[in-house]
Amino acid sequence: MNARRSLFITITVLLVAVIVAVSALTLAQGPRTSAVNMISRNGSTAEVDDMWEGKMTIRYYENVATSRFGPGDFAEEEDTVSFVGSGDSFVGISVNEKKGDIDWNQVKESGNIDFVMVRVGIREKKKGRIRVDQRFHENMQGAASVGLPVGVYFYSKAVEDAEAKEEANFVLEQIREYEVKYPIGIFWEYDLKEDGSQDETSRTVSRNGDQVTGYIDTFCRIISVAGHTPCYFAEKGMAYTKLDLSRLAGYDLWYGEYKPSPSFYYDFKIWQYTEEGKVPGIPEPVPVSIALKKYGR
């Protein structure tokens, strides 16, 4: 019995010693200052330590700027995230026909919204037809009536460069009568099933990352030539594993990650941190983003 008791005490002491050592090491290192730490680089790939995902391998680009933001640059209170770092920041929401009848006076009077990203339209995922968002003009006019600056975006299902060109020209035609101070964005996403695999019924299913990068580049180049600021939306998986960010380095990334702070190795100018924002005057939850630069001011 004494031998067992002695063994138990010895193991307990060792466990306590390990916990103390780990705690001391953590304290010595201090709080994490970088969302993504470079571990090693091997040619065109790099191993990084992501604060949310852990160790992962990503593509490495010489000509793509890296993110300057760390976890200490953002603060979360209840369901709202704010930027507390150095530099400009502006809070925006994304709206489309699914958000219902919006009371723009209430949105403005809430005092929390600096800009609005309005969906211009979509391309259908099966038949590929373009159509205008049913509330596009209503939302553009509503935001303008209360003095909220706007940007716009198009939900793309382009499967060739000619279609991406068509989408860009469609957007430019629709916004002719409006003042657009914030970026014109393209959303290109694969249609997924509940298990995360690609939806075989979608026209985008067979398109690879190089092709998709081309569609985004075509769209953004046309928007830029027309005198507007283009941007493209991408979440972490899409940006790291599908897109060639070096070909898109001249355009602003609208990055989507639904966490208390973003963790992406490369530079982004807008961060969408939730799809479930609650805003007075809007009957449905809306995506909320933080623009980390001044646009059209």
Image (cartoon, helix red, strand yellow):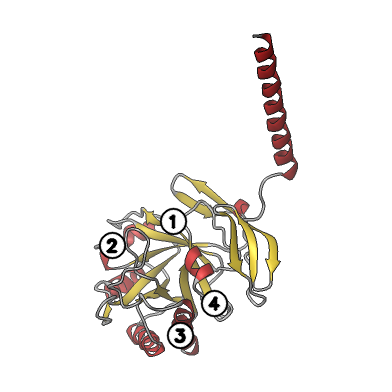
Vertical comparison of 160 with 265: above or below: below
- The three-letter amino acid code for the residue at tag 4 is Asp
Relative height, residue 126 to residue 8 (above, below): below
Residue at 45% x, 82% y is 211
Alpha-carbon neighbours of circle 2 within 10 Å: few (<14), some, or many (≥20)?
some
Q: Residues within 10 Å of mark 3 (few under 14, many from 20)?
A: many
Q: Nearer the viewer, residue 16 or 189?
A: 16
Dot 4 crowding, Cα within 10 Å, few <14, some 14–19, many 20+: some
Nearer the observer, 212 or 70: 212
Identify the residue under disc 1. 112
Write down the quadrant of residue 250 in the picture. bottom right
Provide residue 105's location: percent of width, then percent of height.
32, 61
Separation of marks 1 and 4 at Cα, in angstroms: 35 Å
- In the displayed structure image, the side of residue 57 where residue 125 appears, left or right: left
Q: Nearer the viewer, mark 3 or mark 1?
A: 3
Residue, x 56% and y 75% (percent of image)? 245
Q: In terms of secondary structure, where does tag 3 sit?
A: helix
Q: Point out the image quarter for the N terminus.
A: top right
The span from disc 2 to disc 3 (Cα, nearest Å) is 26 Å
Which comes sooner in the sequence, label 3 or label 4? Answer: 3
Secondary structure under tag 2 reads helix
Q: Which residue is mark 4?
A: 244
For marks 2 and 4, the one nearer the N-term is 2
Q: Is residue 184 visible?
A: yes
The residue that label 2 is drawn on is: 99
The residue that label 3 is drawn on is 223
The residue that appears at 73% across and 45% down in the rendered structure is 29
Element under label 1?
Answer: loop
Give the mark nearer the N terminus: 3 vs 1: 1
The kind of residue tagged 2 is: Lys
CB under 8 Å between discs 3 and 4: no
Amino acid under disc 3: Ile
